[in-house]
Image: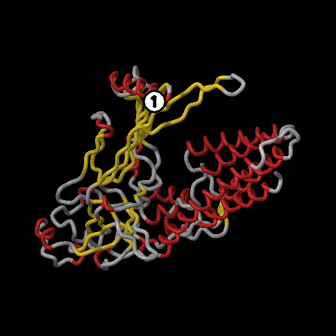
Amino acid sequence: MDLQELDLNGGTFKVNLPYNWVGWLLWAIGLIITLIGFFVAINDTNALVVAAFGLLMMAFTSPGSLESNLNDVRQSAIDPAELEAKAEASGLSIDNWWMSQTSYVPTTDPSDWILPAPGPMSWNNDDRYGPHGDGSALPEHPSKVGTPIPATMTLFTVYCILAIACILIAAAALMTGGEYDGGMTPAIAIAAIGLILSLVGYFKSKMLRQMIDTPTSLVRSAPVGNPELVGQVRPIDQGCLTVVVDGNQNMTVGNMVGYQWSYEQYQCRTTTDSEGNSKEECHWVTIRSDAGGCPFILHDGTGGILVNSNSFKRTDYGQYLKRWDGKFAQTLGKQMMSQAIAGMLGGARVKKHRWTLYGLRLGNPVYVLGQTKPRTSDALAAEGLDGTLGNSIIEVWGNEDAPGIKCTLQRGTELSNLGRSRSGFELVMLPIVMLIGGIALIGLA
């Protein structure tokens, strides 16, 4: 499929099905759970909660309205040798069989380039701020491909509406049952979840609308103010970061300009209810995390501009880059220490460990909406810049919002970020339906 053949306006309704085997597998499991829930609900209305879980699983495994088509464009546009190299580097690896330690690199990356981008061998490191080649914008720049608009409604809407209906019917049946004495608890819980999701969706929809409505500037003519910029991550003279996750040299990733990692433990506790029955409760607990970054150059083909990544209060690195899992900690000493601390603090048993790394690397696509300010003369002199290029004498910061503008840095271009986004309707109206349903249930209490 060619991008020119693709209608980037999602329209009113779009059928969006998974486009990779993992998505299809999870979608199929969700469908099976849904059917089982509906079948059991014939005799027991409470089973509608099971059906609701299956429907939500189907909803969240459904991609954005344009994501599947954009993935097809990526497969046909990117050099097959490059795609094959990425495929060989991704997937599950067994790092230590005896210690049950594995690592996983996602096989698909919705935030990656959709159209070909210049490789490191073609970058001009002697003139980092100058134009690339003939000075035209990158193929995936919004000035060339336009701005996509997510579909107002998709199958995500259908699944969520059905799931909400199942939850409300099950709660109503429970509250009107003869032996029920829980008062308004289910209704208040549903309304509270709906309210929280409505607020989260409202702020996400505002960021979505900001990305759609803000025109993208070319770097060579970027003004002082709050321009929207899209380009490729390239290094400054000082280079980039090598991230050592949790201090373990076996979990090292290079060529990073921004990162965030977390170390989690799967902790289990044995609890006893009021009737004396014991059960095991398990959940992931974040033990340590870290984040950081360094300045980099955003290059859109027309020129480069310095971006201070550490200054951004809002960063979205998209899908994680790599995850390490194991039944044991990386060393025997750390394993004994983690078990001892978990046991002393809450009587928990540590059954699994995982480390997850998110980040922005050299060559990645990046979307930035920040504040451009003039650079100091000392900074220009340190890089040997004479100031003849207008884009070399300004830099981007992300620590000060402007009226109506929220500074943000995201991995991916505008095309890939909007292509996998839900619409403002789906982000806001669906939670509001749940909120109204919960309020309506209060009348049954």
Crowd around label 1: few <14 · some 14–19 · many ≥20 (10 Å): few
Left or right: 83, with 57 as reference point? left
Left or right: 278, with 231 as reference point? right
Left or right: 125, with 277 as reference point? left
**Which residue sits at x=47%, y=27%?**
350
Q: Residue furthest right?
A: 178
In x, y percent, where is residue 243? 29, 44
In x, y percent, where is residue 182? 77, 43
Position of residue 151 relative to residue 224, above or below, is: above
**Which residue sits at x=18%, y=61%?**
125
- Front position in the image: 404 or 324: 404
In x, y percent, where is residue 116? 38, 60
Amino acid type of the residue that numbered disc 1 sits on in the rendered structure: Leu
- Front position in the image: 180 or 286: 180
In x, y percent, where is residue 442? 78, 55
Q: Quadrant of residue 192?
A: bottom right
Q: Quadrant of residue 144?
A: bottom left
Colour scheme employed for the rendering of this structure: secondary structure
Q: Quadrant of residue 261?
A: top left
Number of marks in the rendered image? 1
- Front position in the image: 222 or 301: 222
Helix, strand or loop at label 1? It is helix
**Which residue sits at x=30%, y=69%?**
396
Residue at numbered disc 1: 345
**Which residue sits at x=63%, y=70%?**
11
